[in-house]
């Protein structure tokens, strides 16, 4: 995995604007890199066709067809939409991980690990509070 260049179409808001826009939990995760408690997101159980978008800016991130049950307690995906997410090295908590953030607003979504299913072998382990689900219209 490589680190991506900054997105020229990024959304910049002040901290006060983010606080006003987001729920307290979404603010903590998206803007302060917190992690929601495992097993608490209703999105863990979402199985309908649709799309998962960034709760901060509405950027389309993952097709629901790429979601899988990882057993971790967080919504997990094996493939983001093209150009939707970026990564960077996260050296917090005395370890090195790959952080995943929204390519548009740079909101923290979670981390990606090399232990996912085929075809990518990746597990994008994300905070449900950082996502919004948009069901496919029938």
Image (spheres, helix red, strand yellow):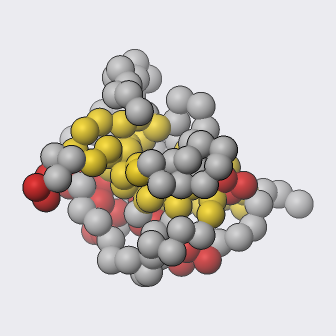
Taking the spot 36% from the left edge, 36% from the top edge, the residue there is 87
Q: Total label count? A: 0
> In this rendering, is residue 71 above or below 78?
below
Q: Is residue 38 visible to us here?
A: yes
Taking the spot 65% from the left edge, 49% from the top edge, the residue there is 118
Residue 106 picture location, percent across and down: 34, 39
Displayed quadrant of residue 35: bottom left
Displayed quadrant of residue 103: top left
> In this rendering, is residue 113 above or below 84?
below
Residue 116 picture location, percent across and down: 53, 54
Q: Nearer the viewer, residue 90 or 108?
A: 90
Displayed quadrant of residue 6: top left
On-image quarter of the C terminus: bottom right
Taking the spot 51% from the left edge, 75% from the top edge, the residue there is 71
Residue farthest to the bottom, as pictured: 40
Residue 72 picture location, percent across and down: 45, 72
Residue 49 picture location, percent across and down: 77, 60
| 39 left or right, relative to 20 | right
Taking the spot 10% from the left edge, 55% from the top edge, the residue there is 94
Q: Nearer the viewer, residue 112 or 54?
A: 112
| 31 left or right, relative to 50 | left
| 32 left or right, relative to 69 | left
Q: Is residue 53 visible to us here?
A: no
On-image quarter of the N terminus: top left
> In this rendering, is residue 46 above or below 135?
below
Residue farthest to the left, as pictured: 94
């Amino acid at each position: 995995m490589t680190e991506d260049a900054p997105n020229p179409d990024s959304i910049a808001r002040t901290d006060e604007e983010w606080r006003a826009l987001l729920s307290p939990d979404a603010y903590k995760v998206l803007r302060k890199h917190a992690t929601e408690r495992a097993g608490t997101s209703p999105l863990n159980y979402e199985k309908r066709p649709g799309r998962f978008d960034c709760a901060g800016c509405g950027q389309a991130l993952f097709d629901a067809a790429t979601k899988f049950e990882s057993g971790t307690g967080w919504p997990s995906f094996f493939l983001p939409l093209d150009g939707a997410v970026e990564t960077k090295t996260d050296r917090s908590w005395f370890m090195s991980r790959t952080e995943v953030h929204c390519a548009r607003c740079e909101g923290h979504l979670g981390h990606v690990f090399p232990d996912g299913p085929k075809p990518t072998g990746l597990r994008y382990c994300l905070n449900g509070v950082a996502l919004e689900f948009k069901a496919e219209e029938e």
